[in-house]
């Protein structure tokens, strides 16, 4: 769970919250998102997505879905290639 609000459980109906819950270090996850999408989002924007005060851009939603699905499935011992995760995220978007 991200270090946002102590005692706050992630809202798994919120893609940003689900993604953040999968990150060991939230700042590292945000850095990867920015590198892979060639963006410069800061932590305040992430928190706005997580609390629902701002909507997720389509590309960010797809990337977060793909990234969090890979992490969640890895927890069950299931390895998913990046290409398969992209297809699955696209189907779920």
Image (spheres, rainbow, N blue to C red):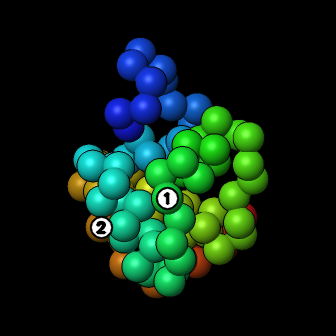
20 on left or right of 27: right
Residue at left 43%, top 32%? 4
Asked if 26 appears above or below 61 in the picture, the reply is above
Identify the residue at image location x=35%, y=49%: 26
Q: Residue furthest top?
A: 7
Q: Which mark is residue 68?
A: none
Question: In the rendered view, would you say 61 is above or below 49?
Answer: below
Above or below, 46 against 92 in this view is above
Secondary structure under the numbered disc 1 in the rendered image:
loop
Quadrant of res 3: top left
CB-based contact (under 8 Å), mark 2 and mark 1: no
Position in image of residue 87 (x %, y %): 58, 78
Q: Please give left or right for residue 34 compared with residue 14 in the image.
A: left
Q: Label 1, on which residue?
A: 42
Looking at the rendered image, the quarter that the N terminus falls into is: top left
Q: Place residue 13 in its image quadrant.
A: top right
Residue 61, percent across and down?
A: 63, 63
Check disc 2 and report the residue beneath it. 79
Taking 23 as reference, is 21 above or below it? above
Q: Is residue 14 visible?
A: no
State the SS at label 2: loop
């Amino acid at each position: 769970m991200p270090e946002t609000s102590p005692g706050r459980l992630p809202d798994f109906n919120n893609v940003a919250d689900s993604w953040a819950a999968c990150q060991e270090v939230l700042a590292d996850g945000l850095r990867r998102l920015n590198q892979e999408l060639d963006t410069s989002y800061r932590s305040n924007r992430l928190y706005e997505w997580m609390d629902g005060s701002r909507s997720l851009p389509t590309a960010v939603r797809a990337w977060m879905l793909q990234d969090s699905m890979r992490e969640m499935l890895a927890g069950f011992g299931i390895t998913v290639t990046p290409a398969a995760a992209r297809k699955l995220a696209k189907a779920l978007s």
